[in-house]
Image: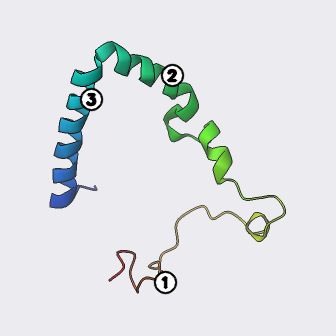
Amino acid sequence: MATPTPEGQRAQKVYGRWAGEVEERFGTAACLALREALVPIVRNGGLDSPLRRGMDPYPDGWRAQVARPEVLPHYPVISMRGGFPDGS
């Protein structure tokens, strides 16, 4: 089971307040209309989402030649900013 960290819990509260302010400012009808317009595009982030097309590698590039992993790697990401993903 995964639970948010205290920072994640604070972020959820901030998001909740922000979303409420947006709905107050623009109205429930406008927010629902926007949601209805976006659902066909996003499709809950599924593999059939049109947004995923931009994530596919260029067919002639090297990434297209490498098999797509089924799971994430079991080692930490080492970026140019530091030894850990948070840059520390």
The figure's colour scheme reads rainbow
* Residue at x 49% of width, y 83% of height: 80
Q: Examine the rendered structure and indicate whether residue 52 appears above or below residue 30.
A: below
**Could you tell me if residue 21 is visible in this image?**
yes
Where's residue 61, x and y in %? 79, 66
Q: Which tag, 2 or 3, sits closer to the chain's start? A: 3
Instruction: Compute the Cα span from label 3 to label 1.
Output: 37 Å
Q: Residue at x 28, y 17 (%)?
A: 27
The amino acid marked with disc number 2 is: Ala
Q: Is residue 19 above or below residue 87?
A: above
Dot in front, 2 or 3: 3
Residue type beneath disc 3? Val
Label 3: how many residues lie within 10 Å, few (<14), some (14-19) or many (20+)?
few
The residue lying at 21 percent from left, 30 percent from top is: 21
Q: Are marks 3 and 1 in contact (CB under 8 Å)?
A: no
Label 2: few (<14), some or many (≥20) within 10 Å?
few
In the rendered image, which residue does mark 2 sit on? 37
Q: Which mark is residue 80?
A: 1
Secondary element type, mark 1: loop
* Residue at mark 3: 22
Type of residue at label 1? Answer: Met
Label 2 secondary element:
helix
